[in-house]
Amino acid sequence: MDHLRQQDPALAELISREARRQASVLRMIPSENYASHAVLEATGSCLSNKYSEGYAHFRYYQGQEFIDRIEDLAVERATTLFGAEHANLQPYSGSPANMAVYFGLLKPGDRVMGMDLSAGGHLTHGAKVSFSGKFYQVRQYGLDPSTQLIDYEAARRLAKEWQPRLIFTGASSYPRVIDFAAFRSIADEVGAYLVADISHISGLCLSGDHPHPLPQVDVVTTTTHKLLRGPRGGMILCRGALGPKIDKAVFPGLQGGPHNHVTAAIAVALGEAARPEYAEYCHQVVKNARALAQGLREREFSLITGGTDNHLVLIDATALGLTGKILAVALEEAGIVANANKIPFDPRPADDPSGLRLGTPALTTRGFKEAEMDQVADMIHQVSRNTSRPEVLAKIKARVETLCAQFPAPGLPE
Ligand SMILES: Cc1ncc(COP(=O)(O)O)c(C=O)c1O
């Protein structure tokens, strides 16, 4: 950052401090990760200077010789890696990718089904406050109260009654496997499009730690910055026949020029994800989440569904006499960064929910294994018993910093 430091020292200092924060805390928000230096270099490259409305070889502006080759390469890597017939890498992020699916396949007012926010779904899966709940008629499916697992039979009954044109699957805070085949049979019964939003679990679908949604679903959407460890972006994969509708929805339907620097950085991340080390990384993400769940269970935490199959663990903080917010704030004071989250059938409001969501993707990128996850569970336990004792939280923070120093994070200055 030599140039930035010289030209705008105040901003450079803030970025440096954020880098030091990322290096010295346990980052456990399940949607966050550390991108590699190579991904960050592409994101910060001169490609940001170029306008390229359209798609490779069909542009509205001149000067696309290298941009076209970069987009071709990124698309080819995406289709090969995910086994998809068609890929669009232009969505600015995950929510715009989902918006493009609605926009491309439906008319405003069409009927849709998605997973309820408090069951673990995402805002864009039909929540009332999102465009998806405002421009479409939505009914939402959820969980079986006795198991806290997706209630596929209730979803089937709802689909038969509601006759949606499109069904969204996928989640932001669901710790178990999603049965895409069950959703395929539900969608087939009512003749609906089936979309899988794998933003959280994309890597696990590649490594075989979670069933792959293709070729069962019609469309797959994903962010590129979570488990995939790319830049912030979005991606849509689909059957070839749907490609033109999706492409038109992204551009010119919803966006102008693509962010070429992001497209290139996604290509870098996809190149990294194609290596055997990435599958090993994803296996370890799941092993670490299981070890964390076990460590927490042994310390008498109450976990939603009792554990995890993927990269995240959801705690009911009210079982400890706390709330998600109280626990998240105390954890941050101790150098452990997670987020308060709704739990299934949560009686508390979204801005002060009962749960806490913890993920292992970023810690696993640092090289944490099961033994470290047990130490992390122990520290979370200590915090939960001492939320209003700053002197204890300060001691745990020192322990966190010692642990972090042993596992340098990639992509940050050394
Ligand atoms: C399942 C799911 N879909 C979509 C998104 C939206 O992504 P973005 O925040 O990039 O718009 C998220 C974000 O966390 C998500 O969890």
Image: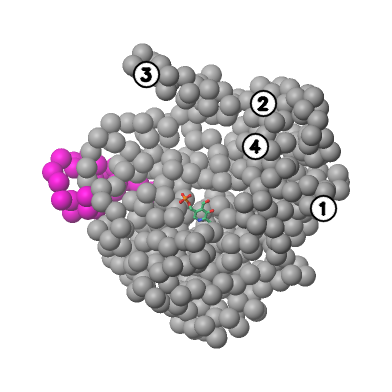
Callout 2 touching callout 1 (CB < 8 Å) = no
Front of the two marks 4 and 1: 1
- Where 273 sits versus 84, above or below? above
| Relative to 92, 273 lies left or right | right
Label 4 and label 2: CA atoms lie apart by 13 Å
Instruction: Say whether disc 1 or disc 3 marks the residue closer to the N-terminus.
Output: 3
Q: Of 211 and 356, which appears nearest the observer? A: 356
Label 3 and label 4: CA atoms lie apart by 29 Å
Instruction: Say whether disc 4 or disc 1 marks the residue closer to the N-terminus.
Output: 1
Judge: label 3 CB < 8 Å from ligand 1: no
In this view, the residue farthest toward the left is 62
Q: Which mark is residue 337?
A: 4
Classify 10 Å Cα crowding around label 4: few (below 14), some (14-19), many (20 and above). Answer: some
Q: Which mark is residue 404?
A: 2
Residue range in magenta is 53-81
Instruction: Say whether disc 3 or disc 4 marks the residue closer to the N-terminus.
Output: 3
Q: Amino acid at mark 2?
A: Cys
Q: Which mark is residue 195?
A: none
Which residue is identified by label 3?
Answer: 8
Which residue is identified by label 1?
Answer: 319
Front of the two marks 2 and 1: 1
Classify 10 Å Cα crowding around label 1: few (below 14), some (14-19), many (20 and above). Answer: some
